[in-house]
């Protein structure tokens, strides 16, 4: 299974008075990686909001914070997606530091496809489901 | 002239690795005070976006940072509005700390009324202009 | 068991382009409630960082997002703490909307006490452990 | 004079309920560019905080917001520094969109060098002053 990786640099804006990244801000990093994974497949969320008119909403998540990230750290945020029914995607994600890939954070994030106007659950767009169900892109090997 | 004051507490989320409030986050505090001033007059921005269909966009601003705020500080954010033509409002604002009102930040913020869909400039709603032009609420004393 | 409740207003800063509160920002609201619970007991985190020299770090969390919050919403963020060993606290938390207490978000957050300089785990301060183990403040009824 | 440019992608976290980037978040983009300009010269702020023990604090700023940025936009943030006395730097900055360099935001930011512990003004480190006063890097042509 291919693991998508996206680099993130830690800036002052990300840190808090404890000198480390504020716990909510790792969720921003996780989303950048999910968004860039979508973009790497040719899906723009700006466009998807217009046609076919869908957004993605996080339904639930769990996060393990192992070691803190600090100012100037260069992180890599992984993203391993899989389909979860007709409406949802599940992402296993990790935040690692530097070339040595020191594990800082791991997360499991469930995202639902919703209608952009009503915010009600709706089916994942077909092209995206096709990708999620292809063996090379997130589907469990059979 | 009446000066509107709104309390703001400093949390971890507001601070950065320097142990003080991150410079962009004071702009959040400034906006909370402008929003609460509008609310104190009976204007909900959520409602205004629907009917009459307007939003407020900051056009320009200048900020002087004199002393930093820290975790747990209790701040007061003032807001002195005045009309600036048919489309804009100007806000003189200050951020003060504690009962002694120690001055931390002062700012001048110019806000334009825009159409919620096109984001093009549009006239301030009449009820708001009426307030801005009343002597007790922001108009220069004559 | 007493449930601590803290009000939070939704501002522009909290929303995203989907018109609802950005998923990471609920974590800010959760922390404000935990911080205010501590303050309600007389614990200032600014002071605790100096003497006895401890900070609190989130170790892990899980969040269920049921319904989104929107601009201008008035939320209440609950906080039900309990001790979890000598070093950790666990918080069951909910975010509710308005007087009708519509449930939006529920979360379980585990927080460790760490040395402010080394960030290594350390025992919860005695006065705090006393509170956590008192029947009226978070301990399971026997 | 060399103009430093740094790319910034707009994510959900940066937008607000108006569908555009929240006005305070442009200040984050401005700082990323200043930080990367420093890094491009070999200055790490994490290291500078330890040795020689200095931080940079914004003293004042002015921002003109001309056109809004939106989700998925690729921005470039420029940074033209110059010395301003022995303690301060001034940055002329612009935020532009896409290959066509559409001007969105322009800003003038004054930053002071301060002692990392006391936050009192202190002289800019010599190596940095040398750079600021070299003709190719920000000094006014004579």
Image (tube, coloured by chain):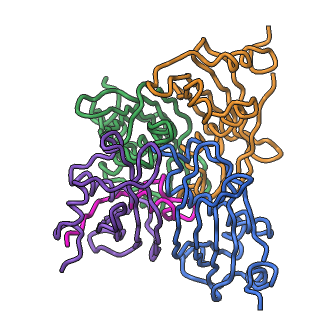
Chain colours: A orange, B purple, C green, D blue
Asked whether the viewer can see residue C116, the reply is: no
Quarter-wise, where is residue C6 in the image? top left
**Residue name at image x 64 percent, y 74 percent:** D91
Q: Position of residue B107 (x, y in %)?
A: 41, 71
Write the start and end of the magenta stretch as one range. B1-30
Quarter-wise, where is residue B127 in the image? bottom left
Residue D106 vs residue B101, the one in the foreground: D106
**Residue name at image x 36 percent, y 75 percent:** B103
Left or right position of B6 against A96 = left
Q: Position of residue B94 (x, y in %)?
A: 35, 70
Q: Is residue B20 magenta?
A: yes
Q: Is residue C92 above or below residue C72?
A: above
Q: Is residue D75 above or below residue B26?
A: above
Residue B38 vs residue B102, the one in the foreground: B38
Asked whether the viewer can see residue D14, the reply is: yes
**Residue name at image x 19 percent, y 78 percent:** B141
Left or right position of B52 against D1 = left
Residue A113 vs residue A98, the one in the foreground: A113
Left or right position of C5 against D36 = left
**Residue name at image x 76 percent, y 65 percent:** D39
Q: Is residue C73 magenta?
A: no
Give the quadrant of the N terminus of chain D.
bottom right
Q: Position of residue D114 (x, y in %)?
A: 59, 78
Give the quadrant of the C terminus of chain D.
bottom right
Q: Position of residue C110 (x, y in %)?
A: 50, 36
């Amino acid at each position: 299974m291919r693991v998508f990786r996206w680099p993130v640099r830690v800036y002052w804006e990300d840190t808090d008075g404890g000198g480390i990244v504020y716990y909510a801000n790792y969720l921003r990093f996780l989303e950048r990686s999910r968004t860039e994974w979508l973009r790497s497949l040719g899906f723009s969320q700006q466009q998807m909001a217009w046609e076919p008119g869908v957004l993605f909403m996080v339904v639930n998540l769990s996060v393990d914070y192992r070691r803190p990230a600090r100012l100037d750290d260069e992180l890599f945020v992984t993203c391993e997606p899989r389909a979860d029914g007709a409406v949802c995607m599940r992402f296993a994600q990790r935040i690692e530091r530097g070339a040595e890939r020191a594990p800082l954070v791991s997360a499991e994030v469930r995202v639902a496809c919703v209608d952009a106007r009503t915010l009600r659950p709706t089916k994942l767009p077909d092209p995206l489901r096709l990708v999620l169900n292809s063996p090379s892109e997130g589907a469990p090997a059979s």
